[in-house]
Image (cartoon, helix red, strand yellow):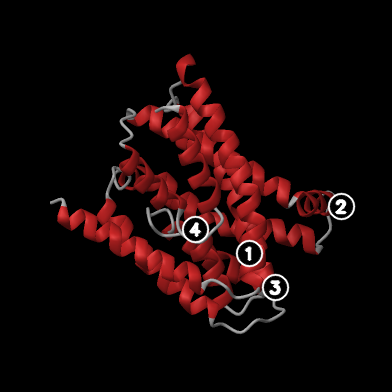
């Protein structure tokens, strides 16, 4: 992988992690278009680094919320901050279960399966279209909501299903405030990303060679900067009910991906 490819894939990850168009799906499409010939271990390391960058960008954008949650939780009282953290913990359960027991099956789907990506993008489009028409409320995410949203997050492990799109849409369709839904969606994934990185590092699945340092660093910077922009932009878009545009985009890209696959059989 050269420097230009690293920048392109970094920007794709940074933008699509927050915009509801599936970061995993677009990374698979990007690698296919760019002809990425990295061995699986190297490709995994690059993907992990990009996810780490977007997790950090989330923390930067929501730094006040993060500090407030930590400060509130340390009071050891049943306050809103502690409840919010526990809701995030509840939302993680489905994804943790899927990640622990179906990891090999999931990884098998990330081998350039463009047809699957195309179909899943169309499903993402449907969710966004429905969520954009939901009425706005002042309702906060409840514990039961958190678990249901967590199921959506687990399903979004499939390439082509947008994690932010699925979780925000589910939350909004459950009647939650759109801004609160976006905030919960972006914060709930941070512990999972760091947990996945820790698991990969401790398991020895990640391999590193000194020659990868430049592309990894540049990819990280590109994803981090793009993530800062996309996260801030997405919050405003959800609040203004502008998700239909992304639904149309997902349909177009999904159909192109399906057509590309069928024409090259």
Q: Classify mark 4: helix, strand or loop.
A: helix
Which residue was labeled with disc 4? Answer: 163
Callout 4 environment at 10 Å: few (<14), some (14 to 19), or many (20+)?
A: many
Q: How far apart, in angstroms, are the residues tagged by discs 3 and 1?
A: 11 Å
Q: Is residue 194 visible?
A: no
Q: CB atoms at circles 1 and 2 under 8 Å apart?
A: no
Residue drawn 72% across the image and 79% down it: 138
**Nearer-N-terminus badge (1/2):** 2
The residues bearing labels 1 and 4 have C-alpha atoms spaced at a distance of: 11 Å
Tally the marks: 4
Task: Give how far across and how far down residue 154 sits, in percent.
Answer: 45, 57
Nearer to us: label 2 or label 3? 3
Asked whether the residues under the numbered discs 3 and 4 touch, taking CB atoms below 8 Å apart as contact, a structural biologist would say: no
**CA separation, marks 3 and 4?**
20 Å
Q: Which residue is mark 2?
A: 75
Q: Which quadrant is the N terminus positioned in?
A: top left
Q: Which residue is mark 3?
A: 140
Which comes before the other along the chain, label 2 or label 3? 2
28, 106: nearer the viewer: 28
């Amino acid at each position: 992988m050269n420097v230009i490819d690293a920048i392109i894939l970094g920007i794709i990850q940074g933008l699509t992690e927050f915009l509801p168009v599936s970061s995993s799906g677009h990374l698979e499409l990007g690698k296919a278009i760019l002809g990425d010939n990295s061995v699986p271990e190297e490709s995994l390391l690059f993907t992990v680094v990009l996810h780490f960058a977007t997790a950090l960008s989330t923390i930067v954008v929501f730094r006040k919320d993060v500090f407030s949650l930590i400060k509130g939780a340390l009071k050891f009282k049943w306050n809103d901050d502690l409840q919010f953290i526990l809701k995030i913990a509840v939302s993680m359960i489905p994804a943790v279960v899927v990640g622990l027991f179906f990891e090999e099956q999931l990884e098998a789907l990330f081998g350039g399966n463009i047809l699957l990506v195309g179909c899943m993008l169309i499903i993402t489009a449907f969710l966004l279209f429905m969520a954009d028409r939901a009425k706005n409320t002042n309702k906060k995410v409840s514990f039961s909501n958190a678990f249901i949203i967590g199921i959506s997050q687990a399903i979004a492990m499939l390439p082509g299903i947008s994690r932010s799109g699925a979780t925000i849409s589910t939350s909004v369709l459950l009647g939650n405030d759109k801004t609160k839904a976006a905030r919960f969606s972006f914060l709930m994934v941070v512990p999972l990303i760091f947990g996945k990185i820790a698991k990969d590092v401790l398991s020895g699945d990640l391999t590193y060679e000194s020659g990868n340092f430049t592309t990894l660093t540049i990819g990280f910077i590109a994803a981090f900067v793009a993530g800062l922009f996309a996260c801030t932009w997405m919050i405003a878009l959800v609040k203004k009910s502008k998700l239909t545009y992304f639904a149309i985009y997902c349909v177009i890209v999904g159909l192109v991906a399906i057509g590309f696959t069928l024409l090259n059989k």
